[in-house]
Image: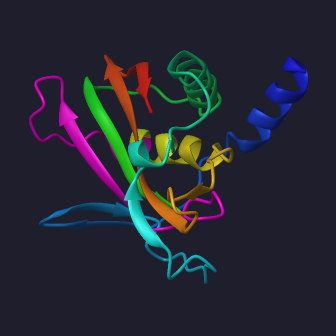
Amino acid sequence: MKCLYTAGLLLLSIAAKSQTVVLPDGEYMDTTSTRHSPCAGAILAHYYSVAGKYPRSSETLRRATQEFLAHQHRAYQGSGYVTFRFIIDCQGRQLPRVQVLQTNAAYQRYRFRQELVSDLYGFLKTLTEWRAAKSPGGQAVNYLAYLSFKITDGKVVAVIP
């Protein structure tokens, strides 16, 4: 099973291409993608109110991230956090228009080199096990999700789902 997982990860290790737009209120990725979701009319909730956390442990995600980045054959720099904010639709699929939040280790605004951010985004796109969610009343729900990567000296040392 590990061999199959590694082969799949190798195939997916090609970083996802996306357009990055930097505005005064933030940085956004994947702005050119469009998808007509059958969940367009669903209510929007936060992941914690609908048990929308990604179903893998932080340690599993950290190891997978490190393996993914190793296949990019780049040397990364910097310390701090890269956080992706995005919406998972009622079918459990990530929607485009991802907001990117970056801080240094002291939680001050910071910009990592674009290669690292793009490669982390490429890893994010490999995560396909997001859960579909429903409200307590059974109504379809889209939910706001976050995935943060803690980086120390260019290495991902933690993933916070």
Magenta-drawn stretch contains 110? yes
100 relative to 128 in the view: left or right: left
Of residues 143 and 112, the one drawn nearer to the viewer in this rendering? 143
Q: Give the extent of the magenta segment.
A: 89-115
Q: Residue at x 41, y 19 (%)?
A: 158
User: How did the renderer colour the structure?
Assistant: rainbow
Residue 109: % across, % down: 12, 41
> What residue is at 28 percent from the left and 39 percent from the top?
112
**Prevalent SS, magenta region:** loop
Query: Quadrant location of the N terminus?
Result: top right
Quadrant in which the C terminus is drawn: top left
Residue 159, position as x, y percentages in the image: 44, 26
Q: Is residue 96 magenta?
A: yes
Residue 151 occupies which quadrant of the picture? top left
Tally of numbered tags: 0
Query: In the rendered image of this protein, does residue 84 appear above or below residue 43?
Result: above
Horizontal and vertical percent position of residue 17: 56, 60
Residue that appears at 60% across and 79% down: 35
